[in-house]
Amino acid sequence: MAEKPKKPQKLKARLPRGLEDRGPAAINATRAMVEKIRAVYELYGFEPVETPAMEYTDALGKFLPDQDRPNEGVFSFQDDDEQWISLRYDLTAPLARYVAENFDALPKPYRSYRFGNVFRNEKPGPGRFRQFMQFDADTVGSATPAADAEICMMAADTMEALGIPRGSYVVKVNNRKVLDGVLEAIGLGGDENAGRRLTVLRAIDKLDKFSADEVRKLLGPGRWDGGEEGKGDFTKGAELSPADADIVLAVTQKRDDWKEAIAAAETYLAKSEVGQAGVSELEEIAKLVAASGYDADRIRIDPTVVRGLEYYTGPVYEVELLLDTKDEKGRPVRFGSVGGGGRYDGLVSRFRGEPVPATGFSIGVSRLQAALTMLGQLDARAEFGPVVVTVFDRDRVADYQKMVAQLRREGIRAELYLGNPKNMGNQLKYADRRNSPCVIIQGSDEKARGEVQIKDLIEGAKAAAAIASNQEWRETRPAQFSCAEADLVAKVREVLARHDVAWG
């Protein structure tokens, strides 16, 4: 007896870990948000530029966050001539390559913005994706702290343009030169101490999450996540002496007055040229933003700001949302940082062999969108779909298509029902799933009278909720009316206007 042929195995549809599919509601919310950000950036004189999602891996080089190996943290492959290519990790390194390659043709300073997805080859987790969107603005070719001050003011204006009220966000500013000076003061200067310096910076970066005592452990021998030896994971510390840890914490502790922070830094930076330069730049930024009306409730000096990227060389800034809210399960949520940036004077210089100062700022669009949606500043619902023209008589499809074309010529989103028109109920269900504001119906009787029926689905849904009796619903047929064929466009516009639906 012959064996039955095996059924071909069905391919399983599955989304890779750390990625997400996005539907109309999320996409529409992103579009609205991006346009508001773009308007602020352009108000400040920045112009758009677009770079590819892939770069030669050596263009990213050791400037990946906290990594010295060029392939670590990125998705990479070799092309047909064995050149290594990587998906971009951020939008800054590609900009540096673009500016270097087009240096003579670009105006200096060069002010540009760009947005798009970036890719991280890291272990995904809750809220941590391998692909997400950023929106950057950068000034290349200006060494003055005024460029950094301007970026900070633009960051504050962007938050308010997105509907985040003053007092609910803050732009925090520090300077990596100050931190470098402190590290120099405790004997961690030089290339041989690069690893320990990085460990210290990572520890400081935890000051917004951990107490000073817990950070002290990270500066010293290390820290157990469970609080006691042997409990949880162990994070190796920077092995600083208690005295040196005291110096680091004295400079980086939070203070209400930025001048106190500066004074504390200067105490330990008296012999550090780079540290003194950092202090001077912070003072200049504070003076510039204050002169433009940006008080400490919007932009403030905060010595705890570190930023993770190794390529920062001067002022660094971070935008923090101060609002507390609750997630869908009622748990408290603190949004924290939704954007940041800093000065990276060495990034373009790698390609040019000459100093090219640069500073920039990046908004984490995906993260900020989640925050704005939770705060009610972004409508998480999908926009209304198109007007649907139904097919009542199968042999009159040309008549219905003519109506669709007429609506489209007037700038009204419209579509012909292209499924199986076996009954009107299925077509109305389809229109409802498309979030259509209204449908057009024309049977042979309406055609003979030169009329069409318009069914207002939005009004109908409201009426259905208010009417308990199905019989009453059938008898009253709310939100459905007839009009002359010649008045179709005008009457559809009336329905759209009634519900504030944009039509063109």
Image (spheres, rainbow, N blue to C red):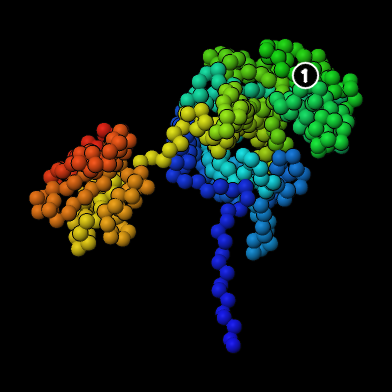
Question: Which residue is at a point 62% across and 47% down the rendered structure image?
Answer: 18
Q: Is residue 141 above or below residue 392?
A: above
Q: Quadrant of residue 342?
A: top right
Q: Is residue 179 left or right of residue 147?
A: right
Q: Residue at x 80, y 25 (%)?
A: 214
Q: Nearer the viewer, residue 28 or 438?
A: 438
Classify residue 31 by image quadrant: top left
The quarter holding residue 8 reads bottom right
* Residue 119 appears left or right of 242: left
Query: Is 208 or 347 nearer to us in this picture?
Result: 208
Mark count: 1
Is residue 416 positioned above or below 504 on the image? below
Tell me if residue 161 comes above or below residue 428 in the rendering.
above
Element carrying mark 1: helix
Image quarter in which the C terminus is found: top left
Residue 359 horizontal/vertical position (percent): 62, 31
Tell me the residue that label 1 is attached to: 251
x, y percent for residue 137 = 55, 34
Where residue 351 appears, as percent x and y from the top left, is 67, 44
Question: Residue drawn at (44%, 34%), measured in percent from left and top?
Answer: 379
Task: Name the one closer to the observer, 35 or 92.
Answer: 35
Q: Position of residue 46 (x, y in %)?
A: 50, 33
In the displayed structure, does residue 402 sit left or right of residue 419? left
